[in-house]
Amino acid sequence: MQKQPYHSDRTGARGRFVNPRLLLRQHRGAPLLSCSGLVIIRQLIERLGIPQAINAGVRVLRRHKPYTESDHILTLVYNLLSGGATLSDINRLGADPAVRRVLGSERIAHASTVGDFLARFAHEPDEQKGHEQRRLRKLRQVIETIQQAAFALLPKQRRQVATLDWDSSNHQVYGEQKEGADFAYDRTWCYNVLYATLAETGDVLYQGLREGNTYTSAGTAEVLPGTIERVGRYFGSVRLRADSGFYDQQIVTICAQREVEFFIVAEQRRNLMKAVHAIPESAWQPFVGKQVQRGRSNEPQRKRRENLKRQITLARKPDTWFKGAPQVAELEFQPATWKRSYRFVIKRTPIIDKDDKQLSLDDGGLLKYAYYVVVTNSQRSAAAVLSIAQGRGNQENLIKDFKHGLGLSHVPT
């Protein structure tokens, strides 16, 4: 394509574009395939030296005839990235000469061969169980080493802060004999997966497969120190965000000892809420979140349109409640079982009726509020603490992309 310059008129206020002349070229030797994005993935894999790292760190096969450990593991990766949902989908990669050419391979292992490779990680008799655990541990260490090599390639301005978001999610399984599968709180037959993601890049820092009925934060304290240390080598500072499922003294203590800034949603237990209700009214200030400036300051602002959703809601359900303008306050509080006190930042939002009048509780005539409480060791303003804590909501999108975008909404193997 021949590029044409951008032309401005005499006033310099507007631009005029010229349609460029198109040059079409035909390359008869290029393969046609639906997953051409694998070319970029292969280039990234080669740049990070992933095959060499896997073969040097993971020992599963006694002989390589002809496939190595990296061949099997990367075949699983290519299968997922090309839309494969089950182990048998690997066979379509090997049957497509265009895919083999893009991946630079003469042949790709059959699904049964890859399945035999995975079976070597399965539970063995007791005398071999320690060897099996070492294999899994070595594989995780290799993955973490590769990820650290990717962090080193980031420009310095993108490595100033690392925000670790923690959560868990259910991955459904279909087999009735899957070891560790159990019914979750929503009666789903599944595994429960512990996630740690990096907000700045979208990377999955940790993924732990657990039984389906496991509590959301179980095992976090064991893997959190290593995760903080690994990320802290490449980033200027580290901070942690999590929901109320991670409201735990041990997690808070680990962060405080390592000078990690944490923002954890607190469980609204009786003693804490009693202290919140005792905050004087004069301490509550209007909460102003992040404001998005629309247009230039010297331009007339567009008139806000009427809330159509509220109108329809009132027409169908006249007694519906709404939320009013939020307020923010803070206090120093020590939970009953904790060894020290921490800073708690509270946002309360009044519940109002259709006439914008605040509702009262049935007993005592107290005004009705919705509360959002965050425990933190940050010295930032209360509004900044709440804004950072609420930013964790994007982790749900990362987990959704990981589960559904890669076909991991269930665990096939």
Image (tube, helix red, strand yellow):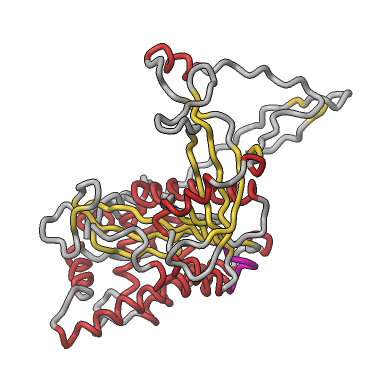
Question: Among all residues in the image, which is located at the extreme front?
Answer: 364
Compared to 179, does 201 lie above or below?
above
Question: Among all residues in the image, which is located at the extreme top?
Answer: 315
What residue is drawn where x is 57% and y is 67%?
260
Q: Locate residue 152, reporting x and y percent.
A: 59, 69
Q: Quadrant of the N terminus?
A: top right
Q: Is residue 132 magenta?
A: no
What residue is drawn where x is 31% and y is 63%?
75
Q: Locate residue 18, reporting x and y percent.
A: 71, 27
Q: Locate residue 46, reporting x and y percent.
A: 47, 68
Q: In this view, does 81 lie to the left or right of 43?
A: left
Q: Locate residue 43, reporting x and y percent.
A: 48, 62
What residue is drawn where x is 37% and y is 59%?
101
Q: Is residue 252 left or right of residue 259?
A: left
Q: Nearer the viewer, residue 275 or 15?
A: 275
What residue span does the magenta drawing correspond to? Answer: 233-239
Numbered circles on residues, count: 0
Question: Among all residues in the image, which is located at the extreme left?
Answer: 176
Q: Is residue 173 left or right of residue 321?
A: left
Q: Nearer the viewer, residue 271 or 213?
A: 271
Q: Nearer the viewer, residue 346 or 188?
A: 346
Q: In this view, does 334 lie to the left or right of 319?
A: right
Q: In which quarter of the image is the C terminus?
A: bottom left
